Image (cartoon, rainbow, N blue to C red):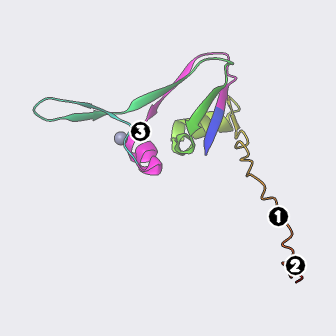
Amino acid sequence: MSIRLTNISHRIRSFHLLHESYCTALGQCSCVVLGGREPRRVAASLVLPANIPVSGLAEPVLELAKVQRAIRAGEILVERPPAPTIHRKQRTRRRVEPKKRESR
Ligand SMILES: [Zn+2]
């Protein structure tokens, strides 16, 4: 499920999407891997501009300690937009009428 965060602290905030907490909870690595003799993993980051809702974020963002602190401090609002409802095609049930016996 995706969430929407709104930074209401009136100043831009950025958070590192730490591998240990974010990627682990996400179930996949979102880090940038820098090549070289010893490839290094660099955490991606999340930037929340002031007063602009950022939607489509993965739920594991809430696993980050700094995000949790900001939420507790009332600096970030968390919203879970309702998932779009899928309208299934309604089956039109036809009454199956018994076959009429042909009269001879
Ligand atoms: Zn990672």
Q: Residue at x 18, y 35 (%)?
A: 39
Q: Which residue is mark 2?
A: 100
Residue on which the image places disc 1: 93
Q: Quarter-wise, where is residue 103 in the image? A: bottom right
Q: 80 or 71, which lies in front?
A: 80
Q: Secondary structure at mark 3?
A: loop
Determine if the magenta segment contains residue 32: no
Structural distance between the alpha carbons of marks 1 and 2: 20 Å
Question: Residue 23 placed where, x, y %?
Answer: 41, 44
Give 56 or 10, whichever is nearer the viewer: 56
Image spot of residue 50 (x, y percent): 64, 17
The disc, 1 or 3, on the residue closer to the chain's N-terminal end is 3
Q: Earlier in the sequence, mark 2 or mark 3?
A: 3
Q: Quadrant of ligand 1?
A: top left
Few, some or many C-alpha atoms within 10 Å of disc 1 (few <14, some 14-19, many ≥20)? few
**Disc number lying in front (1 or 3):** 1
Looking at the rendered structure, the kind of residue marked 2 is: Lys
Identity of the amino acid at label 1? Arg
